[in-house]
Image: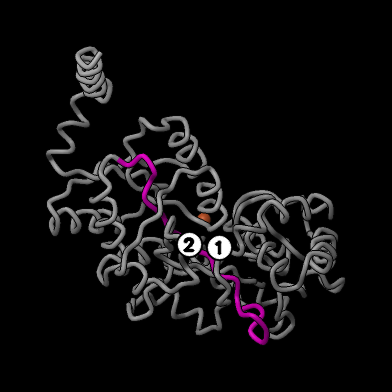
Amino acid sequence: MMKSRGRLGVTMAASVVTLLGLSATAAAQEKVLNLYTARHYQTDESLYNNFTRQTGIKINRIEGQEDPLLERIRNEGANSPADVFITVDIGRLWRAQQAGVFAPVKSKVLESRIPANYRDPNGEWFGFSARARVIAYNKAAVKPGDIARYEDLADPKWKGKVCTRSSGHVYNLSLVSSLIAHDGEAKTEAWARGVAGNLARAPKGGDTDQLKAVAAGECDVAISNTYYIARLLKSTKPEDKAVADKLGVVWPNQSSQGVHMNISGGGMLRHAPNKEAAVKFLEYLASDEAQAYFADGNNEWPVVPSVKIANPALEALGTFKADKINVAELGKYQSEAQKLVDKAGYR
Ligand code: FE
């Protein structure tokens, strides 16, 4: 009995090695980190190279679209080589968390560097950069002060003048979630009905398409994440500059909760084969230099308050009051937000 159990143990150990293959074994010796990321920007190269230089840990990167990457992690299950998953928007981080793919990380570095409202209270995910969702307007049609709050987008005075991407996109679901958190469900449903009635056209395209529609005069106001505006401001293409020239930007809800903020972020995966490297990498992302690279890659703001970046396009947008709500709260309302916009007929 003892003998056969022992033999079974050996056989199992041997087959595990075979299943994982040589790469995993070699990887553990070589010190690697397997990163699944939905981010891909120019400055990311320096971001990863500096980590390898500092720690000797090589980064294997799998890049992909947000939702398929999460699907891949789920399908790979316990055999997944992924150590860290990075994606954008709290809605997606929340979905990944609900799918049970993350493992909690206890780290004094992360807890002291990242403000509490930009990380999961259990350490399953951490925000590493922040973006704001603002209202852009056509300067020829709208005066500054004509619109000040997200709630105003439902005002009948904007009938036929509002452009947004689809309400079911995670950026809008997170915004709707924040309105549910601040205004309650009934008011937010009435708001969604009002916005749907004010649309200049059926939602199509991404935020940049809404900005272009505003510049073209197809609508007067639109909702957009700040980095899309910064991207147009920094672009060397004359057609992008022409769009940027026509746009004004409103920081919404400055006399109440502040502008809706969202994050890019990530966490360590439950089945991570290189957990020590994963924690080191997450801590590295909160360092001064990594924060600057990470934020600059997509014209976002570092989440670590002491880190300063010099991004003229973001500075051109001016200063603002940010909503301090814990973004985890916005995760909780995602499915309610989807039901609410459906009910309101906001597509
Ligand atoms: Fe985006």
Q: Nearer the viewer, residue 100 or 33?
A: 100
Q: Position of residue 46 (x, y in %)?
A: 23, 58
Element assignment for label 1: helix
As drawn, the label of residue 120 is 2
Q: Secondary structure at mark 2?
A: loop
Q: Which residues are magenta?
A: 251-272
For this rendering, which residue is in front, 57 or 130? Answer: 57
Q: Is residue 308 above or below residue 194?
A: below
Residues at marks 2 and 1, CA–CA distance in whole angstroms: 6 Å
Give the total of numbered labels: 2
Label of residue 53 in the image: none
The answer to whether 279 appears left or right of 160 in the picture is left
Residue 223 lies in the magenta stretch: no
Residue annotated with mark 1: 328
Tell me which amino acid carries mark 2. Asp
User: Where is residue 105 shown, x and y percent of the image?
Assistant: 36, 57
Q: Residues within 10 Å of mark 2 (few under 14, many from 20)?
A: many
Q: Residue placed at 67% from the left, 62% from the top? A: 177
Q: Amino acid at mark 1?
A: Ala
